[in-house]
Image (cartoon, rainbow, N blue to C red):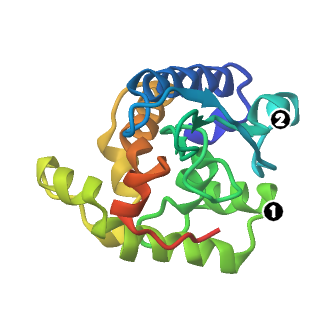
């Protein structure tokens, strides 16, 4: 099941590799002012992270322009915006149909996710996420239509295949909502930590 991916040491390494590729893409695009981007990672204290990979998840890949000093944070599959829990944990613990599944509830308890935090995540999925440019552009592509009140569970069901491949594709698909700078300003999300 998808919940086992949090404990699989190979899966976090895969997500780190994807984040480095996304960061390289951001760096190669440069700054809007024409200046070169230099690494300016910033520290994170991720929750929901296996102890053995925590050092790899303690930095958020980011850049700073050599000319205008503007920060450019790349897309990420490891982090979902400014939330302190890993994106994978936010998706898996928030996923539900008519209520939290026993596996999701157990995972939330294991990760120490407070009920209020879980409710904020669900509110974000149901109220703010459907307003994002990503969802507005892509929701019509899902057949049958995906119900906003069932997010992110609906998304987990739509990305099919072996669990590690399906979840990876989902996290890559969600990555535009994680970028900083102009992309974050366009999305205008309230963070539900």
Which mark is drawn over residue 54?
2
Asked if residue 37 is positioned above or below residue 10 in the image, the reply reads below
Q: Residues within 10 Å of mark 1 (few under 14, many from 20)?
A: few
Residue toward you, 169 or 36: 36
Q: Quadrant of the N terminus?
A: top right
- The image shows residue 133 at horizontal and vertical percentages of 26, 58
Residue found at the far front of this picture: 67
In the image, taking residue 47 as reference, residue 34 lies left or right, namely left
Q: Quadrant of the C terminus?
A: bottom right
In the image, taking residue 161 as reference, residue 17 lies left or right, namely right
As helix, strand or loop, the secondary structure at mark 1 comes to loop
- The image shows residue 5 at horizontal and vertical percentages of 63, 33
- The image shows residue 169 at horizontal and vertical percentages of 39, 32
Residue at the location (29% across, 69% down)? 131
Residue at the location (77% across, 47% down)? 44
Q: Nearer the viewer, mark 1 or mark 2?
A: 2
Residue at the location (42% across, 72% down)? 98
Q: Earlier in the sequence, mark 1 or mark 2?
A: 2
Q: Which residue is mark 1?
A: 112
- The image shows residue 178 at horizontal and vertical percentages of 49, 49
Q: Residues within 10 Å of mark 2 (few under 14, many from 20)?
A: some
Asked if residue 138 is positioned above or below residue 113 in the image, the reply reads above
Residue toward you, 155 or 135: 135
As helix, strand or loop, the secondary structure at mark 2 comes to helix
Dots 1 and 2: beta carbons under 8 Å? no
């Amino acid at each position: 099941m998808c919940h086992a991916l949090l404990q699989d040491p190979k899966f976090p390494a895969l997500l780190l590799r994807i984040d480095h590729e996304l960061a390289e893409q951001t760096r190669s695009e440069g700054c809007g002012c024409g200046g070169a981007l230099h690494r300016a990672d910033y520290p994170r204290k991720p929750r929901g992270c296996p102890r053995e990979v925590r050092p790899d998840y303690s930095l958020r890949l980011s850049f700073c322009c050599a000319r205008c000093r503007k920060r450019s944070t790349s897309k990420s599959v490891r982090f979902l915006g400014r939330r302190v829990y890993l994106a994978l944990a936010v998706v898996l613990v928030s996923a539900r149909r008519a209520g939290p599944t026993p596996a999701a509830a157990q995972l939330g308890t294991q990760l120490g996710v407070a009920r209020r935090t879980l409710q904020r995540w669900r509110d974000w999925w149901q109220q703010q996420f459907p307003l994002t440019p990503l969802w507005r552009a892509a929701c019509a592509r899902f057949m049958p239509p995906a119900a906003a009140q069932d997010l992110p569970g609906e998304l987990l069901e739509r990305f099919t295949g072996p669990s590690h491949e399906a979840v990876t594709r989902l996290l890559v698909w969600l990555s535009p909502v994680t970028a900083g700078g102009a992309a974050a300003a366009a999305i205008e999300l309230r963070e539900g930590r």
